[in-house]
């Protein structure tokens, strides 16, 4: 139950020699970026959200609200590490930052990123309080962070009302860019629909036809979304759904749900639980003998699941992920990210760190390309849907629902004897291109609000 | 949804008993302290967690789960005794809201200290070698460790009962509840007895914590949900009643298990609904005595 808004200043690179800052004048002033000669005149835009109050100084504030307590805290802590890495690269204007955002020098439009970190406790109301503080007290120009979709959706609504850009990190619910989509919010990770569509054909090939499936579904928007999408795509390929158990988020004893599944006659167990719930439920499923007679499938594989349940349990388990560190073997940007992360933190990044890093980089790029922090202009820049080179390949934003069109990685747990190091848990079976798995825009009922 | 099959019904009935007994044990610690000292100890969940961590450390050092169980008990006992001596004893005469606030605060401090020391990622406590595998009882398939846990918990509950109701110390404790001044005048240091009671309550929580560690994830906030559950249990059973905690625990376990056969999403809702009904009909709980403060 910490309530830390620990604010830290990024001291590194505060003297921006690459920049020539001209007389501040009115509202934020005129920033002239030396080499590129692009102009951004704050005075041209009417005030909106924290603009121009949030860009008057030599820095901009980024509010990070992640779960540091509760069932998703391990992922929340990893997100923080991803944000810090991105901020450091952006503020120093490294080659990795410029690979994402070619216009970048040091900082974003010459302003150093300052940040605050708050614990959202995996609770929407706590997240909303923390983010309100970031927006009103710190004049945040961007707010980010989430592991629970319930939190991401609540935060998205608040930031849309405040005309402040909100970038969720982990959120798997179809609703986030569906019926709860927001003009000021952009999701970069894969989600229920894209995961299920990418995964279903792979598990059909691997496990065969006519399987009977039981689900363990956390009882909130994320769980229901993944359940619905998995049901849709597995039933379309001839599998049947025989049971669905709905434990609440944060369950510690799954025995009663597992007994119902044990008696359901299923031969595939689809475990949708995430974070610590995924770890506990899977361990208990093993203890109840379920994994001896059912194949485990984790459609939305949580970061650190492998580390916590151990490789023995993981062998042959299928799932999807946003990122896996072996992508570094194919993509130089991924290589630089993974190596630098490992150097700083002594372990490989989870996809929680990666999505935090990616969202921050894409934001820096969006602002640099827009040439201003003016929120509606930045939103319009995102909505252009330009192709962007990233460490997961080329991606682009879909203007209609603000979902990043991006690959989904289907992974399979390795045999312990095949692991090359202690974190080599998965094979990437397939990187399914984003365009092949995106839902039709109308499917999840996204209606974006006005920009101003 | 169709009617559950007989094997499933029997499985869930057994599971209700197994999970219920564990709830009984945790709730017993809470209710002993409340019944004797009148303090509702909101740090009880934290003591449960301390037991799991102390046991985890003992397991790391010795590799023996039996020693880990003692480690968990001793860890929670020590923390409980310090709590009582340093803070809680000054609150015996204070209004209940002060006691609730101070114990709640202590719980947060303990949780955050553990988080500081151990981090937020779950610590592994494997099922002991003698608890590995699955046991078949007729059509029922159940983890061996959970069956052994039932037996251990049953023995512990009997032990607590004997201590409280069949020994001289227990008599003094119960006399102290009725009239601590009189007990004092008889030359018995009632505050030492109170310390003992607080210690026993804490130790019970720690014992439950380490016993549960192999089936749960050992994390700093693992006690939170158990604190809530143990409240429900003692409200059902009667606040401050030892038999009430046992029966309340089993009833709670059965409600959750049996409801889940029909609708898993409503199993916890049903528990709270039944608690609410019971509070309306019999506010003192099943075994509570009406009007006792």
Image: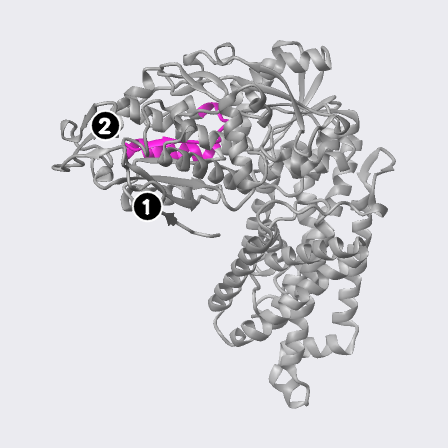
Quadrant assignment for the C terminus of chain A: top left
The span picked out in magenta is A149-175
Q: Give the side of residue B121 with respect to residue A149, left or right.
A: right
Residue A328 rendering spot, x and y as whole percentages: 56, 24
**Residue A317 appears in the picture as rendered:** yes
Q: Secondary structure at mark 1?
A: helix
Q: Chain of mark 2?
A: A
Give yes or no for residue A168 being in the magenta stretch: yes
Give yes or no for residue A418 being in the magenta stretch: no
Give the label on residue A34, or none.
Answer: 2
Q: Secondary structure at mark 2?
A: loop
Please tell me how crowded label 2 is: few (under 14), some (14-19), or many (20+) other residues with Cα within 10 Å.
some
Residue B209 rendering spot, x and y as whole percentages: 68, 54
Q: Chain of mark 1?
A: A
Residue B191 rendering spot, x and y as whole percentages: 62, 80
Residue under the point 55% across and 14% down = A432
Q: Is residue A43 above or below residue B214?
A: above
Tell me which label, 2 or 1, sits earlier in the chain: 2
Residue under the point 82% across and 52% down = B151
Label 1 belongs to which residue? A133
Who is closer to the viewer here, B196 or A390? Answer: A390
């Amino acid at each position: 139950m910490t309530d830390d808004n620990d604010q830290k200043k990024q001291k590194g690179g505060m003297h921006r020699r690459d920049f020539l800052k001209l007389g501040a004048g009115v509202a934020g002033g005129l920033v002239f970026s030396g080499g590129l000669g692009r102009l951004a005149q704050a005075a041209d835009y009417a005030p909106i959200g924290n603009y121009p109050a949030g860009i008057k100084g030599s820095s901009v504030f980024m509010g990070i609200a992640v779960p540091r307590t509760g069932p998703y805290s391990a992922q929340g802590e990893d997100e923080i590490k991803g944000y810090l890495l991105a901020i450091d690269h952006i503020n120093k204007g490294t080659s990795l930052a410029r690979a994402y955002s070619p216009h970048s020098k040091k900082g974003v439009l010459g302003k150093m990123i300052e940040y605050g970190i708050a614990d959202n406790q995996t609770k929407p109301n706590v997240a909303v309080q923390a983010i309100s503080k970031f927006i009103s007290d710190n004049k945040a120009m961007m707010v980010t962070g989430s592991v629970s979709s319930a939190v991401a959706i609540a935060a998205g609504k608040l930031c849309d009302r405040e005309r402040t850009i909100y970038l969720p990190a982990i959120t798997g619910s179809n609703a986030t860019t569906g019926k709860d989509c927001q003009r000021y919010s952009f999701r970069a990770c894969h989600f229920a629909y894209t995961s299920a569509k990418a995964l279903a054909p792979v598990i059909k090939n691997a496990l065969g036809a006519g399987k009977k499936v039981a689900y363990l579904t956390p009882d909130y928007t994320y769980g229901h979304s993944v359940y619905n999408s998995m049901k849709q795509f597995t039933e379309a390929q001839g599998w049947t759904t025989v049971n669905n158990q709905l434990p609440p988020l944060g369950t510690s004893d799954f025995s009663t749900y597992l007994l119902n599944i044990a008696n359901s006659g299923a031969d595939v167990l689809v475990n949708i639980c995430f974070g610590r719930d995924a770890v506990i439920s899977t361990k208990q499923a093993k203890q109840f003998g379920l994994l001896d007679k059912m194949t485990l499938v984790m459609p939305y594989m949580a970061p650190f699941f492998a580390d916590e349940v151990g490789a023995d349990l993981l062998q042959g388990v299928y799932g999807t992920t946003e990122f896996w560190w072996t992508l570094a073997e194919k993509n130089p940007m991924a290589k630089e990210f993974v190596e630098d992360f490992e150097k700083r933190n002594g372990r490989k990044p989870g996809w929680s760190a990666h999505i935090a890093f990616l969202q921050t980089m894409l934001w820096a790029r969006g602002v640099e390309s827009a040439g201003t922090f003016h929120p509606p202009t930045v939103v319009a820049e995102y909505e252009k849907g330009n192709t962007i080179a990233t460490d997961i390949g080329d991606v682009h934003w879909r203007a209609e629902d603000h979902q990043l069109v991006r690959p989904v990685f289907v992974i399979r747990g390795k045999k312990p004897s095949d692991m090359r190091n202690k974190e080599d848990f998965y094979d990437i079976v397939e990187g399914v291109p984003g365009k092949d798995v995106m839902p039709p825009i109308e499917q999840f009922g996204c209606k974006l609000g006005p920009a101003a | 949804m169709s009617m559950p099959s007989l094997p499933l019904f029997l499985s869930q009935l057994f599971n209700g008993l197994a999970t219920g007994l564990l709830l009984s044990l945790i709730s017993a610690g809470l209710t002993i302290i409340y019944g004797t000292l009148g303090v509702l100890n909101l740090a009880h969940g934290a003591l449960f967690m301390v037991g799991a961590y102390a046991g985890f450390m003992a397991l790391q050092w010795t590799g023996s789960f039996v020693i880990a169980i003692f480690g968990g008990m001793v860890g929670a006992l020590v923390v409980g005794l310090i709590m009582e001596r340093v803070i809680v004893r000054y609150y015996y005469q204070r209004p209940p809201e002060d006691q609730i606030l101070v114990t709640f605060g202590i719980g947060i401090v303990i949780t955050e200290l553990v988080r500081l020391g151990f981090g937020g990622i779950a610590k592994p406590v494997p099922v002991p070698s003698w608890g590995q595998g699955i046991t078949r009882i007729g059509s029922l398939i159940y983890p061996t460790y959970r069956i052994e846990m039932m037996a251990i918990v049953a023995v512990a509950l009997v032990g607590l009962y004997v201590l409280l109701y069949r020994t001289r110390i227990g008599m003094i404790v119960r006399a102290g509840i009725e009239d601590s001044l009189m007990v004092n005048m008889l030359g018995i240091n009632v505050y030492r007895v109170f310390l003992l009671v607080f210690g026993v309550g804490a130790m019970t929580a720690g014992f439950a914590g380490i016993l549960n560690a192999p089936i749960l994830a050992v994390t700093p906030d693992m006690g939170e949900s158990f604190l809530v559950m143990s409240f429900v249990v003692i409200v059902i059973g009667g606040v401050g009643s030892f038999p009430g905690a046992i029966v309340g625990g089993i009833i709670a376990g059965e409600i959750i298990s049996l409801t889940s056969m029909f609708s898993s999403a409503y199993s916890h809702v049903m528990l709270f609904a039944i608690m609410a009904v019971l509070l309306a009909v019999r506010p003192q709980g099943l075994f509570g005595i009406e009007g006792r403060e």
